[in-house]
Amino acid sequence: MVDRGASRPYLNPAMTELARRISDCRLCADRFAATATRHAPRPVAWFAPGAKVLVVGQAPGLRVHEAGRPFADRSGERLRDWMGVDEATFYDRSRIAVVPMAFCFPGYDGHGSDLPPPRLCAATWRTEVMATLAPEVTLLIGGHAQVWHMGRAATAGGVRATVARWRDHAPAVFPLPHPSWRNTAWLQRNPWFEAEVVPAIRARLEEVL
């Protein structure tokens, strides 16, 4: 059983009042208690007004839930490599905001697979959070983020097709596959992503940051 909801060392004075309200959210407590992990909510809110880059993922994984900061896992290592930034830059809220489609780890199903982000989270918080941000560059990781931000017409064909059309949205928006190491086979089948998209992202972020 994972229950670290009472411990919130990731809170600090740089957080906005909205982020504090999100960190106190317990709307999904019963939902998470019914999952295979039976964990308590621990929202990971990592943003501040003025950030020039917005990273939108799906939802925190178990390691992020335990660490209390976004992408504190191997996926984060790969994402930071794609972005060409170090940890200090990535975790500087004044420069990079990380706002997933759900702020809490959704838990695992009975087969050990990640559950999808609860829609209740985005319905409750997302519009308010987006109103506080005005990023120059937005990185949309995975289908949930891409559909919400780009719409279904722009994401027709799924993640691969959406990412392949990246030039239609750059330099303001870059759709990405998930940086999970489980996606290594996807990257091997689609070498154009690291050959074309990653250099464009790095160049744009170097310009902005």
Image (tube, helix red, strand yellow):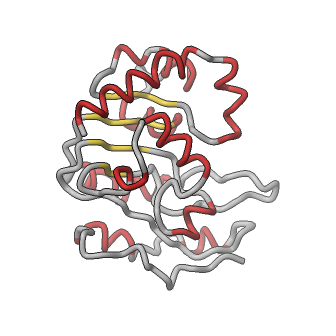
User: Which of the image's four quarters has the C terminus?
Assistant: top left
Based on the displayed image, in which of its 4 quarters is residue 107 positioned?
bottom right
Left or right: residue 34 versus residue 77 is right
Asked if residue 77 is positioned above or below residue 13 in the image, the reply reads above
The residue located at (45%, 49%) in the rendering is 101
The location of residue 7, given as percent across then percent down, is 49, 83
Q: Residue furthest bottom?
A: 6
The location of residue 125, given as percent across then percent down, is 34, 58
User: Which of the image's four quarters has the N terminus?
Assistant: bottom right
The location of residue 114, given as percent across then percent down, is 67, 52
Q: Which residue occupies the foreground of this view, 128 or 67? A: 67
Asked if residue 56 is positioned above or below residue 140 in the image, the reply reads below
The residue located at (36%, 75%) in the rendering is 11
The residue located at (31%, 49%) in the rendering is 96
The residue located at (42%, 36%) in the rendering is 83
What is the tally of numbered marks visible in this picture?
0
Asked if residue 91 is positioned above or below residue 137 in the image, the reply reads below
The location of residue 9, given as percent across then percent down, is 43, 79
